[in-house]
Image: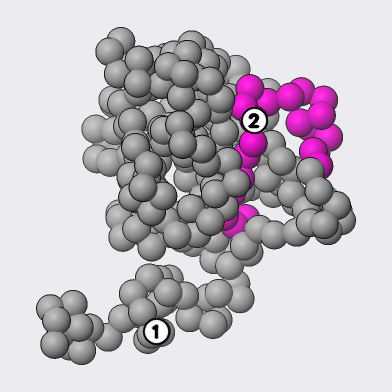
Amino acid sequence: MGFQKAIEAIFPTQCLTCQTIVAETGALCPACWAETPFLGGLLCAQCAVPLPGGAEEGEAFCDTCLTAPRPWGRGCAVFEYAGNGRKIVLALKHGHRMDIGRHTAPWMARQAQPVITDRTVIVPIPLHWQRLLRRRFNQSALLARHLGAALHLPVAPDALVRWRNTGSQDGRTAPARFTNVANAMAPHRRNGALLRDKDVLLVDDVMTSGATFAAAAEAAHQAGAARIDVIALARVVKAP
């Protein structure tokens, strides 16, 4: 019996978000799976918000992205930031459940697959050093590292820097979010060169208005990226 099997025999594997015993590490029990709003069907090609219609209708864009195109190509996400999806993100972000990065990587890899090329470099949204000091880890960098391992792609965790402390975006309106993070990020003086002529996949835990991704995408453009796409673990979806 291997070491991992011996551990599982003594401590049976539990659901990712509850105490229910499951067959394999990182799995969701049937009840939690049902409460996790995985995104599917017709989604906006740039910001992953659900749209009326079916996936067979092909590429589509929401009104927001049609009115003000994003500074990136394609956007995707795993699940809606609601129900068990919100619980998973909060456990990662504030509960120090770093194992979630490893267990959600296959889900993110599946969603990201259509935008992957042989020139793709994975880049996490950077934290300001003061916020990183308080939180002790960057959840976006953690997700990016495990996503890179799942896709066998290089990860450049220090290619971008957040030189201005923008604080939390919580409670801000969409316009205020964009104003708050405008010009807050830039290519790293040395490591930014890693993005030149590369296809960059930006990674974050949650996409709300897209303001943070937009600021990071502008910084990646400054670094000379050839193409930029984005992926979030969760997407905030407003009620219709």
Q: Is the residue marked by circle 2 packed among few (<14), some (14-19), or many (20+) residues within 10 Å?
A: some
35 vs 76: above or below: below
Residue 127's quadrant in the figure?
top left
Viewer-side residue, 14 vs 23: 23
Q: Quadrant of the N terminus?
A: bottom left
**How many labels sit on residues?**
2
Residue at image position (53%, 75%) is 32
Amino acid carrying label 2: it is Gly
- Give the answer, above or below, for where 59 lies relative to 156: below
At horizontal 76% and vertical 31% (from top left) the residue drawn is 65
Density class for disc 1 (Cα within 10 Å; few <14, some 14-19, many ≥20) is: some
Question: What is the x, y in percent for residue 136?
Answer: 24, 40
- Give the residue at x 75% y 59%: 41
Label 1 or label 2, whichever comes before in sequence order: 1
Taking 46 as reference, is 50 above or below it? below
Q: Quadrant of residue 59?
A: top right
> Disc 1 residue type?
Val
Residue that numbered label 2 is attached to: 73
Q: Which residue is mark 1?
A: 22
